[in-house]
């Protein structure tokens, strides 16, 4: 079992940056993949980024590639999503996720059994 708690959401203007953090507790994360999804009002949850905890290899959705960076701090057991050049289209609730499988970095919600409570990110134009 892994418990995930996000922080760092807020209201920013287009072009600004924001950093989201996810604190993980419970099992050791060596065999885990961690990631972020987001859900805008009236839309489905979409994959944003994922990282293999042990190797640090990453994968991004095309819509955020080059603007967002996912990283992890093994000592603090935290996953960070650095979001730069934010656009109004990035407005959503952002969820930290985890799965005990690193062979494939999943991109669908069903592939991640562990979810945080979500944090709101609002980007004004």
Image (tube, rainbow, N blue to C red):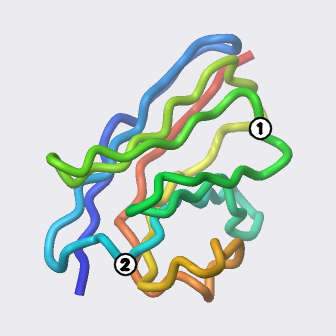
Q: Residues within 10 Å of mark 2 (few under 14, many from 20)?
A: some
Residue where numbered disc 1 is placed: 65
Q: Are marks 1 and 2 in contact (CB under 8 Å)?
A: no
Q: Residue sitting at 57 percent across and 35 percent down?
A: 69
Asked whether 51 or 39 is in front, the reply is: 51
Residue at disc 1, secondary structure: loop
Q: Position of residue 65 (x, y in %)?
A: 77, 38
Classify 78 as above or below 35. Answer: above
Asked whether 77 or 4 is in front, the reply is: 77
Asked whether 86 or 2 is in front, the reply is: 2
| Residue 66 located left or right of residue 114 | right
Please identify the quarter of the rendering in which residue 124 is found.
top right
Quarter of the rendering occupied by the N terminus: bottom left
Q: Residue sitting at 14 percent across and 76 percent down?
A: 26
Find the residue positioned furthest to the front.
Answer: 55
Q: Position of residue 105 (x, y in %)?
A: 63, 72
- Marks 1, 2: nearer the viewer: 2
Classify 75 as above or below 103. Answer: above
Q: Position of residue 39 (x, y in %)?
A: 64, 59
Classify 17 as above or below 72. Answer: above
Residue where numbered disc 2 is placed: 31
Mark 1 to mark 2: distance in Å? Answer: 25 Å
The mark tally for this picture is 2
Q: Residue sitting at 75 percent across and 29 percent down?
A: 66
Residue at disc 2, secondary structure: loop
Q: Residues within 10 Å of mark 1 (few under 14, many from 20)?
A: few
Q: Residue sitting at 74 percent across and 70 percent down?
A: 44
Find the residue positioned furthest to the right.
Answer: 62
Whichever of callouts 1 and 2 sits on the residue coming sooner in the sequence is: 2
């Amino acid at each position: 079992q892994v418990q995930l708690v996000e922080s760092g959401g807020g209201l920013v203007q287009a072009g600004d940056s924001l950093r989201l953090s996810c604190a993980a507790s419970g099992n050791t994360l060596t065999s885990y993949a961690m990631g972020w999804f987001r859900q805008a009002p009236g839309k489905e949850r979409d994959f944003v980024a994922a990282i293999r905890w042990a190797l640090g290899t990453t994968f991004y959705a095309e819509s955020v590639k080059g603007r967002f960076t996912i990283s992890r701090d093994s000592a603090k057991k935290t996953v960070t999503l650095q979001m730069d050049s934010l656009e109004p289209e990035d407005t959503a609730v952002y969820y930290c996720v985890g799965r005990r499988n690193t062979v494939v970095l999943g991109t669908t919600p069903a592939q991640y059994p562990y979810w945080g409570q979500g944090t709101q990110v609002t980007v004004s134009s």
